Image (cartoon, helix red, strand yellow):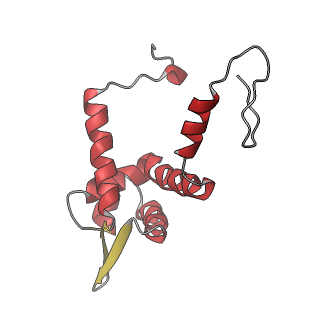
Amino acid sequence: MNVSSDDQVRVIGPDAVDPDAVGHARAHLPAPAAVADVADVLSLLGEPHRLTLLLALRGGELCVHDLALTAGQSESATSHALKLLRAHRIVTPRREGRRMYYRLEDPHVVELLDLALTHTAHSPLRHPERGEGA
């Protein structure tokens, strides 16, 4: 089905379009800038190394060294990931002497992590792109 990108919904080709359904769906979409912001947050959470760091921080504050060991990554890679997460206000640092400790800053991110874990625990994922059945 093809529809025009302007506010008018019209049928192109043999497919029937329900203009009321399309209008309703469009009315409930956030602004494009908000969609882009959500995509940015989800992409931050979607990278396995960063996700591992965030999941480790659900248990409480950890220093960079301990986070690196927990995630099985170098301190340099861990610091780089934390810098990105910090820039997006997902984690916050605290210095104690020569050590830098991080904790989750945003309770919404904790909620997203918890929901994702709950979802995957009761809904086995299938990955057709990896050759797993549909």
Residue 25, image x and y in percent?
55, 38
Question: At 64% across and 30% down in the image, what residue appears?
Answer: 19
> Which quadrant holds residue 3?
top right
Q: Residue furthest right?
A: 13
Q: Residue furthest left?
A: 59
* Above/below status of 12 relative to 88: above
Left or right: residue 116 versus residue 89 is: left
Whether residue 127 is visible, yes or no, is yes
| Quarter the N terminus occupies | top right
Residue 68, image x and y in percent?
35, 59
Left or right: residue 124 versus residue 81 is: left
Residue 57, image x and y in percent?
27, 59
* Above/below status of 61 relative to 52: below
Left or right: residue 31 versus residue 103 is: right
> Which quadrant holds residue 91?
bottom left
Left or right: residue 28 versus residue 94 is: right
**So how many labels did they put on this image?**
0
Of residues 80 and 76, the one drawn nearer to the viewer in this rendering: 80
Residue 16, image x and y in percent?
68, 18
Q: Residue furthest bottom?
A: 97
* Above/below status of 13 relative to 120: above
Whether residue 71 is visible, yes or no, is no
Question: At 35% across and 57% down in the image, what residue appears?
Answer: 109
Question: At 51% across and 17% down in the image, what residue appears?
Answer: 131
Of residues 119 and 63, the one drawn nearer to the viewer in this rendering: 119
Question: At 79% across and 18% down in the image, what residue appears?
Answer: 13
